[in-house]
Image (spheres, helix red, strand yellow):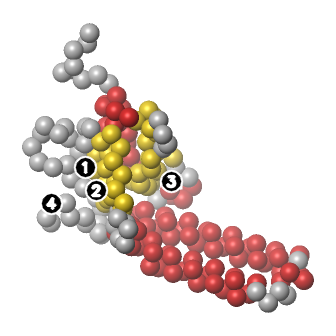
């Protein structure tokens, strides 16, 4: 595999955090395959909630259900959810990558509109990790880097990669041995 290439299938080990004065570039990391499955489960849950709400409307609000616009709208919402789960989410997963160095975390995403986020670690005030029930079931953790302006999100990453990223940010907050303590 060439440098900077993102593996699409298989497990991805967390990249070691390196200093910029070390030889070689910091490796790009792709999201783990479980991220795609977790996104698809979230999408399915949203579709099921919408179907349940529609079911309640059918039972409770009989006159509303008879509106001619409601069935086509419900069908369109279902088709949109299926298209998102089958086409949009895999593309989003394939086009998301990140890397962490001792100076910054860089996130790149997008296929049509390319987006690059650079978060200098000296501007990070806090690191928040979150795991909802779906992410926990897939062994994933969502990382938010709090800056003075607003939090920046990375992931969801594997729990191990999130821990590596958290340690990298925490290490950047400590004074290094090279700095003069005065």
At which x and y percent is residue 75?
66, 86
Give the residue displayed 43% in from the left and 55% down from the top: 156
* Quarter of the rendering containing residue 50: bottom right
Circle 1/circle 2 CB separation < 8 Å: yes
- Per the model, the C-alpha gap separating discs 1 and 4 is 13 Å
- In this view, which residue lies farthest toward the left? 23
Tag 4 or tag 3, which sits nearer the N-term? 4
- Per the model, the C-alpha gap separating discs 1 and 2 is 7 Å
User: Which dot marks residue 3?
Assistant: 4
Tag 4 or tag 1, which sits nearer the N-term? 4
Nearer to us: label 3 or label 1: 1
Which residue matches tag 2? Answer: 29
Which residue matches tag 3? Answer: 136
User: Which dot marks residue 144?
Assistant: none
Circle 2/circle 4 CB separation < 8 Å: no
Give the residue displayed 38% in from the left and 68% down from the top: 113
**Residue 129: in sight, yes or no?**
no
């Amino acid at each position: 595999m060439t440098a900077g290439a993102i593996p699409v299938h298989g497990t991805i080990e967390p990249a070691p955090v390196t200093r910029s004065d070390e030889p070689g570039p910091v490796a790009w990391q792709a999201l783990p395959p479980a991220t795609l499955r977790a996104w698809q489960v979230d999408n399915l849950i949203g579709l099921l909630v919408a179907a349940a709400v529609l079911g309640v409307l059918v039972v409770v609000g009989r006159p509303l259900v008879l509106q001619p616009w409601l069935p086509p709208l419900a069908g369109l919402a279902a088709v949109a959810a299926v298209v998102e789960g089958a086409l949009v989410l895999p593309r989003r997963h394939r086009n998301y990558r990140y890397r962490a160095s001792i100076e910054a975390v860089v996130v790149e995403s997008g296929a049509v509109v390319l987006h690059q986020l650079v978060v200098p670690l000296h501007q990070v005030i806090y690191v928040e990790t979150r795991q909802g029930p779906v992410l926990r079931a897939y062994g994933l953790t969502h990382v938010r880097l709090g800056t003075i302006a607003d939090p920046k999100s990375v992931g969801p990453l594997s729990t191990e990669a999130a821990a590596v990223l958290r340690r990298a940010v925490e290490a950047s907050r400590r004074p290094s041995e090279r700095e003069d303590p005065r």
